[in-house]
Amino acid sequence: MSSALADLVVHPIVQAPMAGGVAVPELAAAVSEAGGLGFLAAGYKTADGMYREIKRLRGLTSRPFGVNLFLPQPAHAEPGAVELYAQQLAGEAAWYETEPGDPDGGRDDGYDAKLAVLLDDPVAAVSFHFGVPDPEVLTALRRAGTVTLVTATTVEEARAVERAGADAVIAQGIEAGGHQGTHRDLAENDGTGLGLLSLVTQTAQAVEIPVVAAGGIMRGAQIAAALAAGATAAQLGTAFLATPESGAPEIYKRALTDPVFPRTELTRAFSGRPARALTNRFLREHGPYAPAAYPDVHHLTTPLRGAATAAGDAQGMSLWAGQGHRLARPLPAAELVRTLAAELNLVRGESGRQYRPVRAQGGDAR
């Protein structure tokens, strides 16, 4: 395993930083304690809220962990398109007896303030979604002792990540649950992404930095396939959704294997950006009309999705999930890490032996 990641993990397993209250400190701590790399999601939180979660996580583990940041987004949406979509959602608002949110709820997600916290009090790893941070940011984090990772959905994006100076690239296949981490949100590219193994193989040949594979991975055998394709580790999100430590509502966890939700789709219905979710009523009714307008649509639908969750109505929630969701196992997170590692070792012909990178070691959580 590359030295950029080897000191952080025992097993080549990274827990995806799922925003919206799923990747809570308890989940990240359990994954890190079991030898993977746990991640907190700073998206949709204030800088102070992020810092409080970091402090809580440090109280739960001394192992390394990471924090994920969303890049600020440019204003490119047509205001008229957002307003028209708001009118279409009037029925949802009436049904849930709430009001749509303000689409002008901010575009930078508190990025600069969060960076300041992470530079002042560094953590082991920081990953970025929705673009490439400035090279100066990556350099500053490296000087602070932080390993940096950036999501890419194409080979061209991966090359941009390498040029900027990141330590590793997360190659996100189209199978992945939640938001696609595309660097430029172009509606004409919807649904054109590469499958994970094709993307990992091409990316590993195109860049010299380590590649972390992400997208639909639910079993150790799939991790083995990603490693064989050129990845140095695998990032799993949906696999950890159903764990007891996950912050996902119980109705969300049950939906992963509920026959009522047999498939997923990429949709802009909930946020204005392509994201893979279980196909439910909200997605079917509103997905075809949702504009390319992130985070405007995210802000607009936040109260509606919150009301649906409070009402226990999975048909109105954003049920982010990867294509492998039916393989979800409600195991404790640490047990899931150990199970995935055992499955990986079995495929690699190393049954009964623990996977250990040459440079793996303990380390503090920073």
Image: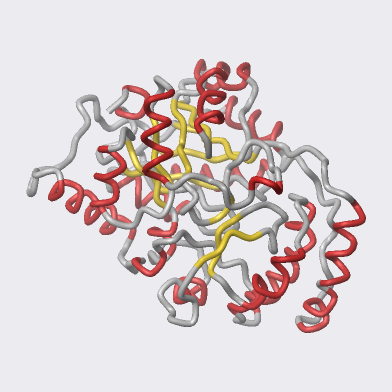
Please provide percent x and percent y for residue 275. 60, 55
Please provide percent x and percent y for residue 38. 41, 45
Q: In percent of the image, x 48 and y 74: which residue is there? A: 250
Vertically, is 163 above or below 80?
above
Q: In percent of the image, x 80 and y 81: which residue is there? A: 97
Please provide percent x and percent y for residue 195. 44, 47
Q: What kind of colouring is applied to the model shown?
A: secondary structure
Q: In percent of the image, x 50 and y 31: which residue is there? A: 155
Q: Is residue 217 left or right of residue 285?
A: left
Is 222 or 255 nearer to us in this picture?
222
Which image quarter is the N terminus in? top left
Which image quarter is the C terminus in? top left
Q: Is residue 25 left or right of residue 136?
A: left
Q: In percent of the image, x 59 and y 25: which residue is there? A: 119
Q: Is residue 144 left or right of residue 207?
A: right
Quarter of the image where one finds residue 235: top left
Is 29 or 170 nearer to us in this picture?
170
Number of labelled discs?
Answer: 0
Please provide percent x and percent y for residue 89. 81, 72
Vertically, is 191 above or below 169?
below
Quarter of the image where one finds residue 183: top right
